[in-house]
Image (spheres, rainbow, N blue to C red):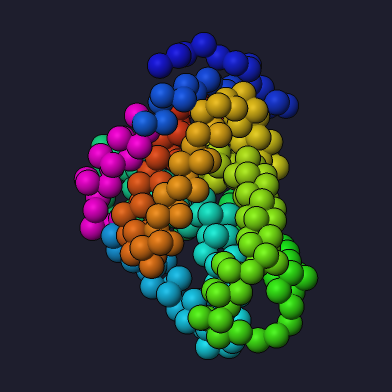
């Protein structure tokens, strides 16, 4: 692991940023798996809540005859994943400190962090998801039309017609661009806001700086998240039970690897 600092932190510029090598992404996943194994009861319980919530949202969209929003909503899950992972940051930090895990300790950590600017950051990512859903709906209406479809007919139109395939290509392209933009300002900002008393603008700027400083490693991490979330969707969200905790723990350790463990104004 490299230890040379890329930037010198100050109250005006934010914390120092350390380089992250691409190969270290595998190491972070291994550490995350270790954390999950040490706290699987908490991990499965927390991720189970979100998995059930995902099923409920999908069923509601189908019930209200909005099946064309199921895939955009599932894909947009990656936009809010850093916020959902807050509880896993609490678990990893407790393990890191050698503390005994408990629901009270985890909930207290999350509650304390929520008193700061974490709520504003959640609002930013939530608004990003809202914008993505609007874009997806407009693209669908533009390429497929306003005619109501049942699920079978919808899948046939999307995967077997020229306009449907074009909709898939452009929609996924636009989604990927938006997802990477949100990833850039949120990947470090959420664990940083959970861990430190900083404002959300500083956290967002620091996150972008980390991504720009470590382009290759962070691109690999973004692609890794997309692949793992994609596998979860293909499994009917069942994969989230394991993948969500691992991504949450790995995100915490990535933050620890990229930002020196000291106060911003230290």
For this view, does 103 lie left or right of residue 224? left
For this view, does 255 lie left or right of residue 7? left
Query: In the image, what residue occupies the spot 40% across and 61% down?
Result: 234
Does residue 83 appear anywhere in the picture?
A: no
Identify whether 197 is placed above or below 126. Answer: above
Position in image of residue 226 (x %, y %) = 50, 48
37 magenta-colored: yes
Position in image of residue 184 (x %, y %) = 63, 40
Q: Which of 248/196 is in front?
A: 248
Q: Could you say which quadrant of the image residue 163 lies in?
A: bottom right
For this view, does 120 lie left or right of residue 223? right
Q: Could you say which quadrant of the image residue 14 lies in?
A: top right
What range is drawn magenta here? 27-43
Position in image of residue 44 (x %, y %) = 28, 60
Identify whether 5 is placed above or below 244. Answer: above
Q: Which of 115/209 is in front?
A: 209
Position in image of residue 96 (x %, y %) = 32, 36
Query: In the image, what residue occupies the spot 55% across and 85% down?
Result: 150
Identify whether 229 is placed above or below 156. Answer: above
146 magenta-colored: no
* Residue at far top of view: 4
Query: In the image, what residue occupies the spot 35% across and 37% down?
Result: 29
Quadrant where the image shows the C terminus: top right
Quadrant where the image shows the N terminus: top left
Does residue 53 appear anywhere in the picture?
A: yes
Query: In the image, what residue occupies the spot 55% across and 26% down?
Result: 216
Q: Main secondary structure of the magenta part?
A: helix
């Amino acid at each position: 692991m490299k230890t040379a600092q890329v930037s010198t932190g100050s109250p005006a510029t934010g914390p120092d940023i350390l380089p992250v090598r691409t190969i270290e992404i595998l190491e972070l996943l291994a550490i995350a798996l270790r954390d999950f194994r040490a706290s699987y009861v908490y991990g499965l319980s927390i991720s189970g809540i979100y998995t059930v919530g995902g099923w409920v949202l999908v069923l509601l969209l189908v019930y209200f005859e909005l099946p064309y929003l199921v895939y955009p909503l599932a894909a947009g899950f990656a936009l809010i994943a850093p916020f959902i992972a807050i509880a896993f940051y609490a678990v990893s930090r407790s393990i890191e400190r050698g503390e005994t895990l408990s629901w009270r300790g985890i909930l207290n950590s999350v509650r304390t962090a929520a008193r700061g600017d974490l709520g504003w950051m959640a609002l930013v990512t939530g608004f990003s998801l809202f914008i993505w859903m609007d874009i997806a709906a407009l693209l669908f209406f533009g390429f497929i039309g306003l005619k109501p479809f049942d699920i079978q007919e919808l899948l046939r139109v999307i995967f077997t017609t020229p306009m449907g395939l074009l909709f898939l290509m452009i929609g996924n392209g636009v989604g990927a661009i938006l997802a990477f933009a949100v990833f850039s300002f949120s990947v470090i900002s959420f664990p940083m806001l959970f861990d430190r008393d900083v404002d959300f603008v500083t956290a967002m700027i620091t996150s972008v700086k980390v991504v720009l400083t470590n382009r290759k490693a962070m691109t690999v991490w973004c692609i890794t998240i997309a692949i793992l979330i994609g596998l979860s969707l293909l499994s009917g969200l069942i994969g989230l039970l394991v993948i969500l905790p691992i991504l949450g723990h790995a995100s915490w350790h990535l933050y620890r690897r990229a930002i020196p463990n000291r106060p911003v104004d230290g």
